[in-house]
Image: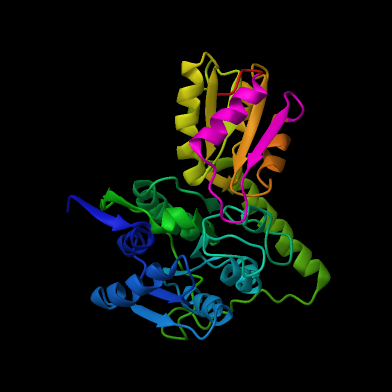
Amino acid sequence: MGKVLMKGNEVIAEAAVHAGCKYFFGYPITPQSELVAYMARRLPEVGGLFLQAESEIAAINMVYGASSAGARVMTSSSSPGFSLKQEGISYLVGSELPAVICNIVRGGPGLGNIQPAQSDYFQVTKGGGHGDYHIPVLAPASLQEIVELTQDAFDIADQYRTPVILMGDGMLGQMMEPVEFTVRSEKPVCSKEWATSGTRGDGGPKIITSLELDAEGLEKRNWNLQQKFAVMKKNEVRYETYLVEDADYIIVAFGTVARISMNAINRARKEGIKAGLIRPISLWPFPEKPFIETRDQVISYISVEMSAGQMIEDVRLAVNGHAPVDFFGRTGGVVPTQEEIFQKIMVVAGGVTV
């Protein structure tokens, strides 16, 4: 197929189609509306079904129904709309149903604006709905990485019978870059014997529910889920490092902020400041290993975010008191600049800002 120039939201949609997604239920909200529009055109071309629901709440419950029948299914939204899906997401986890849910984050709280942000970090990593649960969260930094991680998201969802969140910011959804769609030669095969299909020769009807009125029965379910989360925490960690081997100061950033930070790190290096980068790709499970490997050598970490400071809590837990953790953030839809991040590195390092 070769490389094609596409917008981020459309890349997510096309990557989902390549991953075998045949069903999409959603509702338009800026800055992810192009994803919905693309699916409306594309899915009928591959024998799939697109349906614009009457609300985000309806959409996530339609996802529940399609997943129960064994389909590869997806929905997407942006911050306020994603909030409306939380009850349904908790039901998906409780019923152990696979699905991919995309959140293209915008400035908040409340209606906020349509500018890029990362201020849904708490919501996606700490369980935005009710109950004891976790969801794998993947945060791409480029449109080509979206292609890979979208396909990974569907595979992880099926492997563990869990919803998976693909999280980007409004800038990632709206930017355009050349991408190449590759068809994976070997796709993991996951049995869906649990799926509902009526009584047509499969041993009788199946029941999928998250309801368990017996307290001890529900506790048993919860402990089974916790064991599954532990396996995901062991096997599904993803991260990238840049120039950390000799770094005295390490920026921690994800998504598009990590790309901006790399330029600031290169500039700091030219000024004699040994800076590096840890880029979490899986926001949950959070990558602790690169911190364990560097925290005894590092003078300070700097969490750089498009929020008032949310990921910094996980950074501090991973560092575990071995080194100071500083913070630089912009919020409300303001994107931190290379210059601002460079200045922050210089201040923390005791250098002279320019």
Residue at the outermost right position: 215
Magenta-drawn stretch contains 347: yes
Q: Residue at x 34, y 47 (%)?
A: 144
Over which residues does the magenta segment extend? 320-349
Image coords of residue 6 (percent x, y): 28, 57
- The x, y position of residue 322, in whole percent, is 74, 23
Name the one closer to the observer, 217 or 68: 68
Which percent across, then down, holds residue 210? Answer: 66, 73
Give the quadrant of residue 329: top right
Residue drawn at (42%, 70%), measured in percent from left and top?
Answer: 33
Q: Where is residue 286 in the image (x, y as percent from the top left)?
A: 61, 42
- In terms of image quadrants, where is residue 341? top right
Check the image and name the residue furthest to the left.
1
In this view, the residue in front, 19 or 317, is 317
Q: Is residue 101 magenta?
A: no
**Number of callouts:** 0
Return the residue found at the far front.
354
Task: Report whether 344 appears left or right of 189.
Answer: right
Check the image and report above or below for 72 versus 242: below
Frontmost residue, 69 versus 138: 138
Viewport quadrant of the N terminus = bottom left
Above-or-below relation of 341 to 298: below
Residue 144 vertical position relative to residue 200 in the rendered view, above or below: above
Q: Which residue is drawn at 56% across and 51% down?
A: 334
